Image: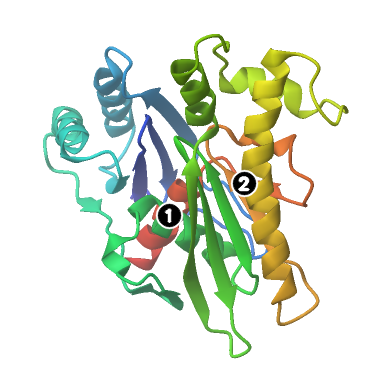
Amino acid sequence: MSAPRLLLIDIGNTRLKWAWCEAGAALPATGALPTPWQHGGAVAHADEGALQTLAAELRALRASGPMPSVWISNVAGPVIAAAVDAALVDACGGCAPVQWVRSAAAHGDLANGYREPTQLGVDRWVGAVGAHRWLPRDTLLVVTAGTATTLDIVTVGADGSACFEGGLILPGLALMLGTLARNTAQLPSLDVGDAGSVAGAQRRWADNTHDAIAAGCLAAQAGAIERTWRALGERALDARPARCLLSGGARGALAGALAVPFEMHDNLVLLGLHAMALAGA
């Protein structure tokens, strides 16, 4: 009999990402962040035919083996959720077991310290679950550089208890750049790629408007991350610094601007969905 399979879907504010994997595949030991899927894809919501692309991928997946179990995180609202449901029906005939994940008071040994746990964005919660699953003994600063840039804190107490403590939400790098272009008369429009090309420059400040905008927006993002990382270090229970994890579509541009150690991962939400699926909840 073929091994059971998982289909993981992350519906973000701007893009829809997915990946599939064999549920019984061998996994590495904890201590590093794996990418336990065989194949993944992504489409922007605004792309014409985006859902048709997903449906075609799902039909190919369905034809190649047993029906997958589907786990979904959605922050983009009910319209896109209904469209994804329709794509699943188109591809799998409506018979695939589907789990729409919600934020909860706890998952395993990770408590949700949000004032109202169900009000925590599900992508932030699932990303924290995924990071903590593989780094269970570390204080974590989980940074997701997407439409918004989110900074989320996971701490581990002396007794081994873990808690999602909350975090910060900033406009994403693309939003910062776009807001300047839309709301000023003579400043140029830049994208994340423009900012990334400036990130590695050795100058302390820019000598032209294009680079000044890119460097300023990067500095705002990096400054929030570095300030939070230092604050976690000041309250650390041991000598180890917090581990800064960087994910999201703008992670490459932001990475070049950071002056603290960090680790990058392709998609912590998918990693969290994988952890939840294997745990069965």
Q: Quadrant of residue 157?
A: bottom right
Please tell me which residue lies in front, 39 or 41. 41
Q: Earlier in the sequence, mark 1 or mark 2?
A: 1
Q: Quadrant of residue 138?
A: bottom right
134 horizontally vs 165: left or right = right
Q: Residue furthest front?
A: 185
Q: Residue furthest bottom?
A: 159
Picture coordinates of residue 141, whole percent (x, y): 61, 59
Picture coordinates of residue 237, whole percent (x, y): 71, 82
Q: Residues within 10 Å of mark 1 (few under 14, many from 20)?
A: many
Q: Are marks 1 and 2 in contact (CB under 8 Å)?
A: no
Q: Quadrant of residue 92?
A: top left
**Kind of element beneath mark 1:** helix
The residue that appears at 42% across and 38% down in the rendered structure is 19
CA gap, disc 1 and disc 2: 13 Å
The residue that appears at 62% across and 59% down in the rendered structure is 28
- Where is 133 relative to 189, above or below? below
Picture coordinates of residue 86, whole percent (x, y): 14, 31
Please tell me which residue lies in front, 153 or 4. 153
Q: Residues within 10 Å of mark 2 (few under 14, many from 20)?
A: many
- Where is 165 relative to 5, above or below? below
Q: Which residue lies under the disc numbered 2? A: 246
Picture coordinates of residue 257, whole percent (x, y): 74, 37
Marker disc for residue 198:
none
Amino acid found under the numbered disc labelled 2: Leu
Q: Is residue 241 visible?
A: yes
Q: Which residue lies under the disc numbered 1? A: 124
Q: Is residue 253 visible?
A: no
**Kind of element beneath mark 2:** strand
The residue that appears at 16% across and 40% down in the rendered structure is 78
